[in-house]
Image (cartoon, rainbow, N blue to C red):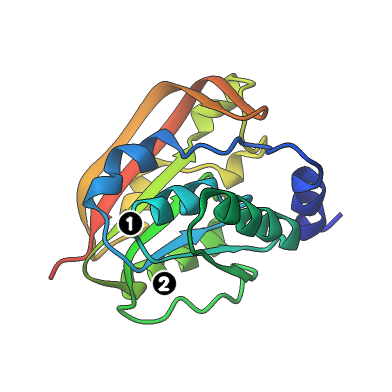
Amino acid sequence: MSDTTFWDERFRGDGWAYGTEPNDLVREVAAGLSGPVLCLGEGEGRNAVFLAQRGLEVTAMDASPVGMEKARRLAAERGVALTTQVADLQDFAFGEARWGAIVSIWCHTPIPLRQRIHRDVVRALAPGGRFVLEAYTPRQLAFSTGGPKAVELLCEPEDVRRELAGLTFERLEEKERDVHEGALHGGKSAVLQVLAVRPR
């Protein structure tokens, strides 16, 4: 089964795999974000729609057309405009100095791809732009509360710091916290939270 097929199956149906409310970190930092905003691996659109409700211009991208259709539906239900793009991160064009914010929530990829994505993020943020990331660390494997089961898809803080060279970190924090997002994220979790800024 391809990754796209996996996510299409996960998102298919009437329910919302991870709920319709935003991730806690996104909610916490939203007031400090400016547009345009790019949400990576955005699934069914909950974070993108939340940011659009705050008046930001938002593009949601994901490899799953099923997920992006549900993102458009959620945006319509909430009465906001949202741009969606079905794309694979392997060949997604981030652009240069284009985005006021880039958001990556639980967007776990193999290490070589993650390294390339993070290099692209640094270039693609406009001066003063912010990168928001929450991801599981390898310590998450001790919990059965969500996330990939393969250690190579999980994030070590110092690796992420190196990969985002060129950004200034307002937060790079590994912590354990309760995550409750839909049916698939529920309980104590080992996470990395990042808020980083491209200098002006």
Q: In the picture provided, is 139 more to the left or to the right than 197?
A: right
Residue drawn at 61 percent across, 23 percent down: 145
Residue where numbered disc 2 is placed: 120
Question: Circle 1 — which element?
Answer: strand
Q: Position of residue 71 (x, y in %)?
A: 61, 55
Quadrant housing the N terminus: bottom right
Instruction: Say which of marks 1 and 2 sits in front.
Output: 1
Q: Label 1, on which residue?
A: 131
Quadrant of the rendering where the C terminus is positioned: bottom left
The residue sitting at the left extreme is 200
Residue 75 in view here: yes
User: In terms of secondary structure, where does tag 2 sit?
Assistant: helix
What amino acid is at disc 1?
Answer: Phe
Q: Is residue 58 above or below residue 103?
A: below
- Say few, some or many: other residues with alpha carbon within 10 Å of mark 2 (under 14 / 14 to 19 / 20 or more): some
The answer, for residue 42, to whether it is visible in the render is no
| Residue 27 percent location from the top left of the image | 36, 39
Q: Which one is in front, 99 or 155? A: 99
Disc count in the image?
2
Q: Spot the residue most to the right.
A: 1
